[in-house]
Amino acid sequence: MGLPDKKHNTIPWISAPWISGVLGGAGSTILLYPLDLVKVRLQVNEDPTGNQKGAQLTQQRRTIVSTIRGVIRHEGMVGLYQGLTPALLGSALSWGGYFYLYEGIKLRLIEEKRRKANIIDSSDRTDDDTKLVFSENFTVACMAGAAMVVCTNPIWLIKTRMQLQMTRVLEAERNQSGNVGKAVNGFPKDAIKPPYKNIVDAARTIVREEGPLALYKGAAPAMMLISHGGVQFGTYEYLKTHFGTYTKAKRSTGTKSSGIGHQLQDSIGYLTMGAVSKIIASTATYPLQVIKSRLQQRSQAAELSASGEVKIVKREYAGVIDCVARIWKREGTRGFFKGCIPNVIRVTPNAAITLVVYESAMNFLS
């Protein structure tokens, strides 16, 4: 993305990445949210996936389709959108803030490169003067990602917990009259924690029950996950540079087409580049996502068993090392990739939609 001419901007240029990021993040989140909920529920499931007896049957039953059916059966269609509010808030803040910082740092690096090269007159500029190499884009993306982890980790933690809570089931069990003794899975009814009502109630409850630092559970793997953004946007900028060179050469030698035709070609290009860069980054860093989800989940929760029945589970991890050790011992290598399929199905169009909306909004605003 080249540097815009600030004289002709109707909106301050540094605000354009923030607005574009918010629009792109919110749009993709709404469209693909049910897949994200399914992914998180599969990630935290501790069913063995190794050679233990019965493990293969369990793995076959716990699929995207069976998970969606279970959610609809026990929670209705609205259950597929539990936690949407913090997801939208987190996505808007993360993408908006991320692109704001990402483009701002890029701009300063480019200006510094020009200064060192003693390029003052715009007529002396070349394309190479306004481009960063892969390592520079990677570093910028990681810096922006680290800043957003600090700002948004509490929101993502609340989102994860609200996605995992089976609100209707928990409320029904707590309010059920008669049979005062035992509830689901042998838990006393008065020991079942009530579900969070909304994002504010969740924040208050977490601080009251676990302390303010609990809002930053999973921050360690989240910080390690900034490499995800580095890989994604480093790859994206690399592809975009070559795509831009190719289209510029093609348009200079080919037949003239309308502006709409060029916009369509650009959108298809952005879609492809966004999808490819996201698949590479997501696959490379997926085990960190599993660890993060498990650390952020509530210590007590209701979940669907492999047979589709509801059970109350209690899980607590001492930290990243404990989480890794327990996954490896009980679930093997596959445990680190639970939910990977719905994740790939989701992130491919997610990144593509986000980046297309982002680039289109940037072109409009700038």
Image (cartoon, rainbow, N blue to C red):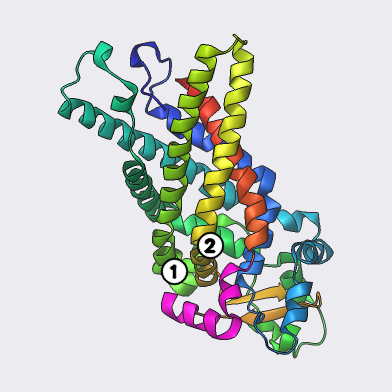
**Residue 315 versus residue 180: which sits nearer the camera?**
315
Report the residue at 28% width, 26% height from top: 129
Q: Per the image, is 105 magenta?
A: no
Instruction: Quickly name the residue at label 1.
Output: 214
At label 1, counting other C-alpha atoms closer than 10 Å, the crowd grade (few under 14, some 14-19, many 20 or more) is some
What's the CA distance linking mark 2 and mark 1?
Answer: 23 Å
- The three-letter amino acid code for the residue at tag 2 is Tyr
Q: Position of residue 241 (x, y in %)?
A: 43, 31
Instruction: Quickly name the residue at label 2.
Output: 286
Q: Which residues are magenta?
A: 319-338
Quadrant for the C terminus in the image: top left
Quadrant for the N terminus in the image: top left
Q: Position of residue 286 (x, y in %)?
A: 53, 62
Count of number-bearing discs: 2
What label sits on residue 48 in the rendered view? none
Which structural element holds mark 1? Answer: helix
Is 102 situated left or right of 157 in this image? left
Report the residue at 45% width, 66% height from top: 218
Q: Position of residue 227 (x, y in %)?
A: 41, 55
- The three-letter amino acid code for the residue at tag 1 is Ala
Q: Vertical placement of 251 versus 138: above or below? A: above
Report the residue at 61% width, 57% height from top: 198
Report the residue at 49% width, 60% height from top: 285
At label 2, counting other C-alpha atoms closer than 10 Å, the crowd grade (few under 14, some 14-19, many 20 or more) is some
Q: Per the image, is 336 magenta?
A: yes
